[in-house]
Image (cartoon, rainbow, N blue to C red):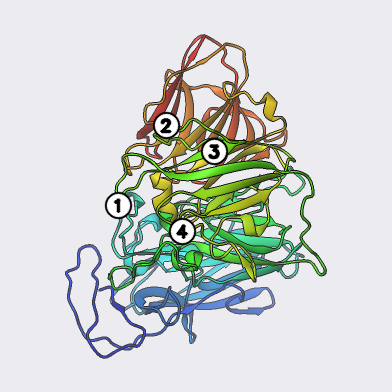
Amino acid sequence: MLELHRSTRSLALASLVAFASAPRSARPLAAADTIVINDNRTGAGTLSGNVLTVRLEAREGEWHPDGDKGQSIMVRAFGESGKSLSIPGPLIRVVEGTEIHAFVKNAIAGKPLVIRGLSRRGVNAAATDSVQIAAGETREVRFLAGEPGTYYYWGSTTAAALANRYGPDTELSGAFVVDPRGTGSQRDRVMVISVWYRDSLPGGLQQPNSLVRFTINGKAWPNTERLSYSVGDSVRFRLVNTSGIPHPMHLHGFYFNVDSRGDGTRDSIFDPRGSPRKVVTDRVAPGRTMTLTWVPERSGNWLFHCHDNYHILRNLPLDGSALPELKMDHAEHALDMMGGLVIGISVRPAPGATLAADPRPRRQLRLFARVDSGGTNDQPAYGYVLEEKGALNPSAGPLLPGPTIVLTRGEPVSITVVNQLPEATAVHWHGIELESYYDGVAGFAGHPGRIAPLIAPRDSFVARFTPPRSGTFIYHPHADETRQQQAGLAGAIVVVDSAAAFDPDRDMVMLLTVPRRADADKVLLNGSMTPATKNLRVGEHYRLRIVDIHTFRPSMIARMMRDSTPVMWRAIAKDGMTLPSDQATMRPAVQQMGNGETYDFEIVPTAPGDLRFTVSSAVGVLLVSQTFRVH
């Protein structure tokens, strides 16, 4: 049985929530071990010479993902023998070539345990390696730590695959890091991403009322650890996705470099002498790992979070009761109206540093958030309208898609967001390098004493920045994100070297958003489920700017097809960063995308006929398509 109860451990009966096939019932609560949160800063075991001895134990305990005073869940977890259970499990961290001598005890009553990931790391690791341990027994394992990299170990009482674990098994995971010889102490943070489900969710599709916890190192926002750095620090994160769901991870305000990607058995570390892989959002698939580095160049408060909106929803109380009502004008929006996979980062300014205002004249724009036709109280219809020098973009309605904001590299701009909605809002300038106060995370972004506010109805907020590079970016709400984006609030930003030379007939934005009615079987392409045919000419160069700002579906695949065969296109940019020559390659026109990513490709039609741009789900379900007629 899966048990949910208050942290007071009252002797009264508490609600018991069964998983999948078990019936609902109730019984008196028994004392249980309290599971501690593991920040992955200290490695487990005892090192003697070149041998690390680790004694692990798996058993049930009481977990508080919402903080020590929050409600708790009875789950299974790993711990070192004689110590508290922890989520994630104890960190195993060694230098390559170290011998691991592990003892694993299964103290889960009446359940066999299958544990994977405790084998030689690297080239010779077997994807199906497993150790089976009967209830009450202990198994001994010896192996060598092979290639350096980021790995993990995990367990299951049902022999389920990693992606199919749910209920009390979901937290049976721990990180395993192998450091290169001669590197000394590593200044990095290891973040284990996990998802607890009360019940199995077919296909991993979460609904807003699902009882679920998305956690980083055992806690859900706003209880996740707050990180603090100084301007100029070198920051390294190791991400381990032990959930069965992909997570497009997004860093506000800065680019990060992807240093390695792994699958738990092999970590592909990119040659540091090669060109960097700079992004602001990157998709971490189920069971995969990623190492990233970045340098905070500007002070203030910033977020690092999953960009699947359903993974940062407010946390539904663990006893299944309704969420308390919060008004949208609530000052602590970021803290009280977000949950799940979010990390808050504070960057301290360099000693004596001050923020210098750009003295040059600013281009003045106004962006109106307005009510569109056809909405309801439960499912509103909203949209953006852009104004410059008193001239409005055509806006007869519907207000879809959001207008593309074309800016010039190096030109200062002020964008006044005017809120004509019946509720508060805020706008995040996704991928833009700017000051924290203008980042758009209401109640969080900025500096102590100067925190960005929500934009109340009939009020406005001026965002000021100077785009430092040409590229493709996004703007969208960072207030009640899922609801307001689904209502229609999202658009693309195109930064160019010369606005006068921008030609939308050859430089085409492909904006992917969720339909207002949340039709899970469709996607909007530039505001339409049936976009009109476009004409192209043989031999001419066209740029496709693919902008994925869907609220869920973090695994969509874009293709450009002639009949049933992908054509060739050349990669140009990722997340607004122009690709270096070794990455700007010709390739088949197929690209998997995560929410919050942008991809720029160049295509040159070689023969008359029809090309078809398609977006499908990861399992091949067509979501939207557009025909390009080549003459």
The residue pinned by badge 3 equals 386
Indicate which disc, 4 or 2, sits on the residue closer to the N terminus: 4
Tell me the SS state at disc 3.
strand
Quadrant assignment for the N terminus: bottom left
Residue drawn at (29%, 47%) of the image: 376
Mark 3 and mark 2: Cα distance apart in space: 13 Å
Compared to residue 446, the image places residue 381 above or below, namely above
Camera-side residue of 365 and 297: 365
Tell me the SS state at disc 2.
loop
The residue pinned by badge 4 equals 129
Query: Can you tell which mark lies on residue 378?
Result: 1
Indicate which disc, 1 or 2, sits on the residue closer to the N terminus: 1
Mark 4 and mark 3: Cα distance apart in space: 57 Å
Q: Nearer the viewer, mark 4 or mark 2?
A: 2
Q: Around disc 3, counting alpha carbons within 10 Å, would you say few (fewer than 14), some (14 to 19), or many (20 or more)?
A: many
Camera-side residue of 260 and 255: 255
Compared to residue 44, the image places residue 297 above or below, namely above
Quadrant of residue 503 within the rendered picture: top right
Q: Nearer the viewer, mark 1 or mark 2?
A: 2
The residue pinned by badge 2 equals 396
Q: Check if mark 1's residue and mark 2's residue have beta carbons within 8 Å.
A: no
Residue drawn at (58%, 60%) of the image: 303
Under mark 3, the amino acid is Leu
Instruction: Give the image location of residue 125, x and y in percent.
Output: 54, 55
